[in-house]
Image (cartoon, rainbow, N blue to C red):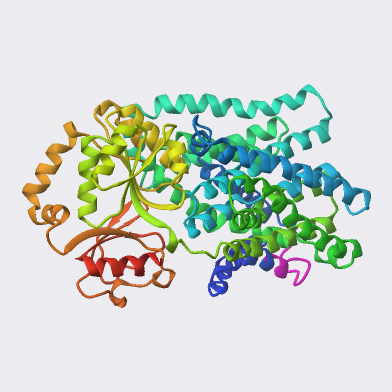
Amino acid sequence: MEQRFIPLLLVVFLAFLVPILLARFRRIPVVVGEIVAGILIGPSVLGLVHAEEPTLELLAEIGFAFLMFLSGLEIDFSILFAASRPGQDKKKSPILLAGLSFLVTVILAAGIGFWLTGAGFVRDPWMMTLILSTTSLGIVVPVLKEKKISSSGLGQTILLSALLADFLTMFLITVYIAIRSTGLSLNILLIGILFVPVVLLYQLGQQQLRRPIVRRLMEELADATSQIKVRGAFALMIAFVVLAELIGAELILGAFLGGVLASLISEPNDEKIRYKLDAIGFGFFVPLFFVYVGVRFDLQAFLTNPDAWVLLPILLVAAFAIKILSTFVFRFAYSWRETLSSGMLLSARLSLIIAASAIGVRFGAITESTNAAIILIAALTATFAPLGFNTLMSVTDEKKRRAKLIYGGSDLALQVGKELRAHGDDVLFLEKDSEAANRIREQGFDVVLNGGSQSSMLGSVSDVRVDAFLALSSSDDENLDACRVARGNDIGHVLAFVTEPIRIPDFRGLGVQTLTPSMHRSSLLALMARNSAIFSLMTSTDDQRDLREFILYNSGLYGKRLMDIKFPAGALVLAIRRNDELIVPHGTTKLAAGDHLTVLGNLETLTEMEDWLEGW
């Protein structure tokens, strides 16, 4: 009897073991370890698993499609819309700088591609151009979040550069392979069919999913054995993969667009579904793909080919040089240190370059030895590019001013500013009207005055670490625009005063917390009636105690139980908000990266807790 599941068992066991072995080497991406593990058990070394295993091959292909789907799901196109709003300083526009950077990237990559072809190292200059133009959005996003600069102008520019490189390179690879396969014909236009269902299903989803009866049904079937939204995500991914195959396009574009559509029609309260999809993908399917990449790695073809040994350092230098030189356009808006560090981070390649290389092998555009060299380039850049970025960006955020931003100069905004100041918070106002700005300054507040758009004002405070953004003007439309720009700049905590309850869905669609007088006065009165002590703690400014929320960035506390942590005297952790879940903590509760801890304590203790928990 054929044992089809023994190779799968070995691969799954290695996928489980690799993160444990790399736990003490956190700077090495787990993906690199998975590829190395695949090389060890593959035909190149031990020969325990072969690339022709049908079960493993199918699951790896599903894992590849799932990885592209999750990449599309991570993209927030509101960043593009916010970056291109009128009134922004064009010289510092993230979308302009990112577009120029990608154009320079393609030109430089084409020069390298044709030079390598002329030197006899590669067969197809255009395929090598697209391979060298790739980057890794999956590495860029977490590194920016870890460095806590994703909300800054520089962070947005880097993020948009990675987004454009991923999306446009993926699209161009699909078009080029179609041209290479069928020639320059009208069939190429069929690729555009992939975008039609994205538009149609987005419009349909926006209309139908907001209907109360549909929303209620989806919520009822979202948990337990039904998991309807997870099933819907899988159906969407497979449908776009099948559609891509039917029109002769690459599955990477189909799966990616499926993820984009899922991201567009999802709502803020669907975060739990994203975590479930991440768990399924990165817990099973995606590791299988990367281990399978290692299994297919032809080490012998690389070792026995002298050209591959020469090609490896050339490609490594080219991979870094192309991205670093292309980010020189950032120098129009940022310092040399920031420009060079951006180029280092964008030099990271991973899943897309491996996928593009595999496609090139399948169509005879590149050889197996060149493919092996490209896989090594992916592993090396994924390891060293983030290290170079962190080294160049070694200036910590301790020098940054930490403040709460208030948009608007209404009486309510001034009163909120005074309350925040009384609680010891630094408050900065954003205002367009000079008369209103003078009135705010008379109350002792700092004001950023700018007659342009909200986006241009936010660009002028890029050196401020924003704890919270409050849209408190008297106009719901202005508040909505301000919240859209704030979310586009990756400000996590955004609040808005909304006068018309009918506008609340517009704000909540952006993930904004709202306060509407006609709806929330009763809630506040009920809170006072049921929990007068808690309300007093929240509002009192004449004692030495306060309630504050901190985000856990101190990696030394990750995974530790509360009972094992020696908190400062007088500090009490009342609640932990993790993703979309509110946890009432116990002594055995373990902390995790990014936890929001609500802490009660005296002012001196809370200041100490802030430095300790947030690691600044």
Q: Which residue is most to the top?
A: 186
Task: Name the residue nearer the viewer: 111 or 163.
Answer: 111
Give the image quarter of residue 582: bottom left
**What residue is shown at x 81% (from left), y 63% (from top)?**
313
SS assignment for the magenta stretch, majority? loop
Image check: 450 left or right of 596? right
Image check: 556 left or right of 600? right
Residue 496, percent from left and from top: 30, 38
- 588 relative to 85, above or below: below
Indicate whether residue 41 is drawn in magenta: yes
- 392 relative to 364, above or below: below
Q: How many marks?
A: 0
Indicate whether residue 83 is drawn in magenta: no
State whether residue 66 appears in this view.
yes
Give the image quarter of residue 451: top left
Residue 157, percent from left and from top: 57, 45
State whether residue 215 appears in this view.
no
Task: Name the residue nearer the viewer: 327 or 205.
Answer: 327
Residue 123, percent from left and from top: 89, 47
Image check: 553 left or right of 37? left
**What residue is shown at x 12% (from left), y 38% (from top)?**
522
Could you tell me which quadrant the C terminus lies in?
A: bottom left
**What residue is shown at x 35% (from left), y 70% (from top)?**
612
Residue 370, percent from left and from top: 83, 56
- 508 relative to 46, above or below: above
- 462 relative to 23, above or below: above
Range of magenta residues: 38-50
Could you tell me which quadrant the N terminus lies in?
A: bottom right
